[in-house]
Image: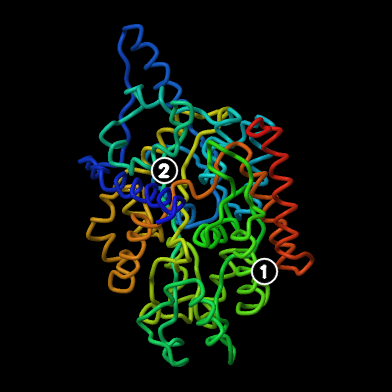
Amino acid sequence: MSTKMQRLFSLMMAVLMMLSLTACGGNATSSTPASVSGSGSESGEQVSEAAKRLEEQKELNIMFVAGNFAESMQKIYADYEKEYGVKINYTILGVDTYFQKMLVEMSSESDAYDLIYLMSPQFLQYASNDWLYPLDDLIADKSITDDALLDLDGLMQSSVDAQRYEDKLYGLPVCSLTTLLYWRKDLFEAAGLDPEQPPETWEELREYAQLLHKDGVYGVGMRGARSAGGSEGLIWEWPMVMYSMGGDFVADFPNDMTPTLNTPEVVESVEYYADLLQNYSFPGATTCNFEDITVSVQQGDLAMWIDGAAIVPNYIDPEKSKTREEDVGFAPVPAGPEGRCAPLNVHSVNIPKNAKNKERAWHFMQWALSEETLVRLGTEGNLVTVSREAVYNNADFIEKNDVGDGAWLNAMRDSLANYAMPQYRPLNPEWPEVADIVSNYISDVFAKQISAEEAMEIANEEVAEVYREAGYIS
């Protein structure tokens, strides 16, 4: 086993250990956070002040990015409004627009929002820029925190740890996401392929795509859009090809930040990815995001696709999709010469530093991420990946989300435990800028404006300059 794969294997095993050590959810029977009260002591007066602020805060301004959590929460947040007499101003924006707006809001120290939604790459940028409010004091204040309901130990600890920065906790995880390979069994069979045997390697994936790409059927779908804040588009999916082919962003993160984007392995991964999207995918694939892949799946003309595990309900919704659940196969992503590598992205809810209603935002967070509410989001809504292992054992949740007779859940757990990379991207405050540089040049390759070798040479130089200015390299 190569040194790189030894490191990757160690990281994968770390994820497995952290997930396996996660405790089950608490025994709370109500999703109602603690009542507010205080005592006459000095600490009690402080608690009482927090409780008083909570009671005075009757409005909550929430901005979430479009996705299963936001759309599922939209169906039930009125229950919180009714129970607590609070007016919630609830806004959902598409991923590109959302992160552009959030960057402006946070950098200008706006107080417009009390609760926001982040992903792993943005979290570090926001925390390091002092744009988020730490939760530690809120958790310690028992006049506004119900420990049984919060059940911090019941959340997946690897995901909780991903919300820490400089020994402070800045958010709570909604879910941990990875990516899967999906294929249409009926289209495989029509093309003479074994419907129960997906491609095991990236080269096999290309060969299968070549066979399937005909007669109005598109061979494969993967994201081709430029990066949006360092997480979406091609920067979410291309790295798994790069890593499995032996490439990396830097020499040895975080010890040696010398960029390695111009190595033969990285160049080969870009050429491979471009070939798939240019020649064996649907029109517009080189600029597509997950929404576009979903549309192609729903239209019934996509034979294989690689995308997030959480998007499954949209693929097989009988009211929207021509693709039937029984025709879809689920598996971890293909392997390259260096093995199988999958993304890991922790999604979270966070309180901005300048939020006007911090105590109310914290109160809502406890309610929203309680076991009871997460079960509702997964049964009444479409949240299929959650941050509490106990939810996966809930009978109602299992009945609603038993996709493919358990094949989806098994593939997702296999990927998270064995292939998802905790350090999927070299995350530091400069990452969003680095991601934009890399994805922009790869996008130019997709558009046939420049060769992969030239593009990655220039990208390597520009990323090196970013890291020099940050003091990581000389």
**Which residue is at the far front?**
2
Which amino acid type is marked by label 2? Pro
For discs 2 and 1, the disc positioned in front in the rendered view: 1
Taking 434 as reference, is 358 above or below it? above
- Separation of marks 2 and 1 at Cα, in angstroms: 31 Å
Quarter occupied by residue 40: top left
Instruction: Decide if residue 394 is on the left or right side of residue 9.
Output: left
Say the numbered circle drawn on residue 75: none
**Which residue is at the far right?**
449
Q: Nearer the viewer, residue 336 or 52?
A: 336
Taking 281 as reference, is 380 above or below it? above
| Residue that label 1 marks | 286
Residue 387 image point, x, y percent:
36, 48
Residue 420 image point, x, y percent:
42, 54
Q: Which residue is painted at 28% across and 31% down in the image?
A: 147
Secondary structure under the numbered disc 2 in the rendered image:
strand
- On the rendered image, what quadrant is the C terminus found in? top right
* Callout 1 crowding tier (Cα within 10 Å): few <14, some 14–19, many ≥20: many
- On the rendered image, what quadrant is the N terminus found in? bottom left
Q: Which residue is painted at 44% across and 27% down in the image?
A: 168
The chosen color scheme is rainbow
Residue 36 image point, x, y percent:
34, 24
Q: Which residue is painted at 47% across and 91% down in the image?
A: 191
Instruction: Decide if residue 334 is on the left or right side of residue 392.
Output: right
Which circle's residue, 2 or 1, is located before the other in the chain?
Answer: 2
| Residue that label 2 marks | 173
Quarter occupied by residue 154: top left
Q: Nearer the viewer, residue 284 or 208?
A: 208
Q: Which residue is painted at 61% across and 59% down in the image?
A: 266
Which amino acid type is marked by label 1? Thr
Residue 399 image point, x, y percent:
26, 66
